Amino acid sequence: MRLVVLGDPVEHSLSPAIHQAAFQAEGIAGSYTARRVDAAGLEQAFDEIRRGDLDGANVTMPHKHLAAELCDVLAPEAARTGAVNTLVRVGSSIVGHNTDVAGVTTAWWWASLPTDGPVLVLGAGGAAAAALVALEQRALTLSARSQRRAAALLELIGVAAGVVAWGEAVHGAVVVNATPVGMHGEPADAEVVAGASGWFEMAYGSGSTPAVTACRDRGIPVSEGPDMLLAQALEAFRLWTGRSPDAATLRAAMMAAASHRRENAKPAHA
């Protein structure tokens, strides 16, 4: 079985470590690699899937919306969010799924985040759409740098939510960071962090984001980006293979790969 993750950038991805561990755990002969692609490269990968040269793929930033346009069929959650992160070949057709929706629900449960009370979602892209759909039964507020984009997203996915200005806190809310802020050490808005009852990171970098660290220091429950990555990967692997590997085994492989990457990134001592 041949699988690939497609994005730009994609070199940082921990998905290959997760899925190679899943293949091994389930006794499946397979490979999962990372491929940096532009729009033309994404279209080429679709052709490879249709020919059977690839059995499926994950799609990450910035191609999730284009992937939705290129699919032959969209699963309900993908059609609703307008974003696809998992490609599954069914006969000669490619079905697009959005496993981020299930990933939010699973990672939320793993972290024991509050299941009542308000939620503040930061961002107006595909990740924010997935979070809003996953949490639509909650009291939701959306915040983005462009309030126009925030309103357009809510109209697209049909979720009821308030909209507040970027940087405005919703006190007592679990904050879902569906933006890249923090991946490279950037701090989140101090007021937003101070008002949070929990923090859910959807992206991941080389370590904990400043917002996650600040919340932990205050005893506030958090879910980090790797949790989300693992949760959505489990759903993607199930769609491709019908198998559900042990999450702890895959988490260990993911964390080992992340640790190895951090060690290799350290400057050599004189």
Image: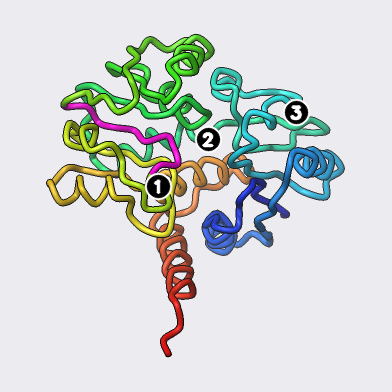
Give coordinates of residue 34: x percent, y percent. 65, 56
Which image quarter: residue 17?
bottom right
Give the mark, 3 or 2, whose residue is nearer the N terminus: 3
Give coordinates of residue 174: x percent, y percent. 25, 31
Q: Amino acid at mark 1?
A: Gly
Q: How many marks?
A: 3
Residue shown at the point (49%, 35%) measured from the top left: 100
* Helix, strand or loop status at disc 1: helix
Residue shown at the point (35%, 27%) measured from the top left: 121
Contact, mark 3 vs mark 1 (Cβ under 8 Å): no
The relative height of residue 92 versus residue 32 in the rendered view (above or below) is above
Give coordinates of residue 254: x percent, y percent. 46, 60
* 168 with respect to 60 (left or right): left
Magenta part of the chain: 172-181
* In front: label 1 or label 2: 1
Residue 225 image label: 1
- 266 or 32: nearer the eye? 266
Q: CA distance from mark 3 to mark 1?
A: 27 Å
The relative height of residue 126 versus residue 267 in the rendered view (above or below) is above
Residue shown at the point (24%, 32%) measured from the top left: 192
* Helix, strand or loop status at disc 2: loop
Crowd tier of the residue under label 2, counting other residues whose Cα lies within 10 Å: few below 14, some 14–19, many 20 or above: many
Give coordinates of residue 2: x percent, y percent. 72, 54
- 41 or 56: nearer the eye? 41
For label 2, the residue is 99
For label 3, the residue is 70
